[in-house]
Amino acid sequence: MNAPSATLAPMPPARRKLLDAAMIILRKKGYAATTVDDLCAAAGVAKGSFFHHFDGKEALAVAAAEYWSATTGALFAAAPYHAPDDPLDRVLGYIDFRKAILMGEPAAFSCVAGTLLQETFETHPAIRDACAAAIFDHAARLEADIDAAIARHGIAGGVTAASLARHAMAVLQGAFILAKATGDAAIAASSVDHLRRYVGLLFSRPEGASP
């Protein structure tokens, strides 16, 4: 999922180039296998420029998680699923949007924060915390619509908005892993379909039912 960066706060061009390169390389190679030389070559900047902007690879990874959160935040903020008046339609529309952007190879649509987190959660606490913030902040934005949907429609089983939003993140991150394991976006899309059915059933909105 390569989000546009045009709406982000201004930053030096070399820093932005390095972060844009990190969005691609970290998802393809992982944190340990990615080198500063890889990032500089992909960004087209000198190594001295890298160390002008970042103390080292860990600092770059922390900034990459934050940059990922900002770029995807802009993408999702502009997405069409916000348009419906009914918050449940917005929640279901969010899930439909997640499926629609599962395009290309897994490295193109998987999550930078999730990828980094799986590899560094024990060894690099600063990266772990930045990635966790990116994922939970995204969940919190979805939680607001879920909470409004619960207030309007009720929900089965005493499910809370926070728990359902976080479950959605768990399904999506797991779907990315399955896609990486198979090289096939379709298996991720199938998991997202199951998530949509589950949410619809919680709100007594079965698949295909009218709003």
Image (cartoon, rainbow, N blue to C red):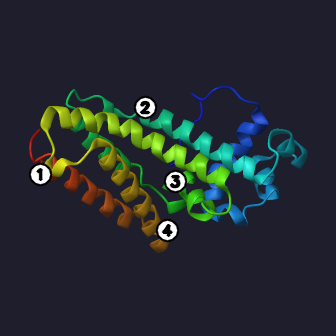
The answer to whether one can see residue 2 in this image is: no
Q: Secondary structure at mark 2?
A: helix
The residue that mark 1 highlights is 206
Residue holding disc 2 = 77
Q: Secondary structure at mark 3?
A: loop
Q: Is residue 87 left or right of residue 170?
A: left
Between residues 135 and 46, which one lies in front from this camera angle? 135
Dot 3 amino acid type: Cys
The image quadrant where one finds the C terminus is top left
Query: Which one is nearer the viewer's eye here, 113 or 42?
Result: 113
SS for dot 1: loop
How much space separates mark 1 and mark 2, taking CA atoms?
27 Å
Q: What's the amino acid at mark 2?
A: Ala
Badge 2 density bin: few <14, some 14–19, many ≥20, Cα 10 Å? few
For the point 45% across and 61% down, which residue is it?
176
Distance from disc 3 to disc 1, alpha carbons, whole Å, reads 29 Å
In the image, is residue 77 above or below residue 162? Answer: above
Tell me the crowding category of disc 4: few under 14, some 14 to 19, or many 20 or more residues within 10 angstroms, Cα based.
some
CB of mark 4 within 8 Å of CB of mark 3? no
Chain-order first, disc 4 or disc 3 = 3
Task: Work out whether mark 1 precedes mark 2 in sequence or the reverse, and give the earlier one.
Answer: 2
For the residues bearing labels 4 and 1, Cβ distance under 8 angstroms: no
Residue 199 visible in this rendered orientation of the protein: yes
How far apart are the alpha carbons under marks 4 and 3?
Answer: 11 Å
Residue 86: x and y in percent read 19, 31
Residue in the foreground of this view, choosing between 191 and 156:
156
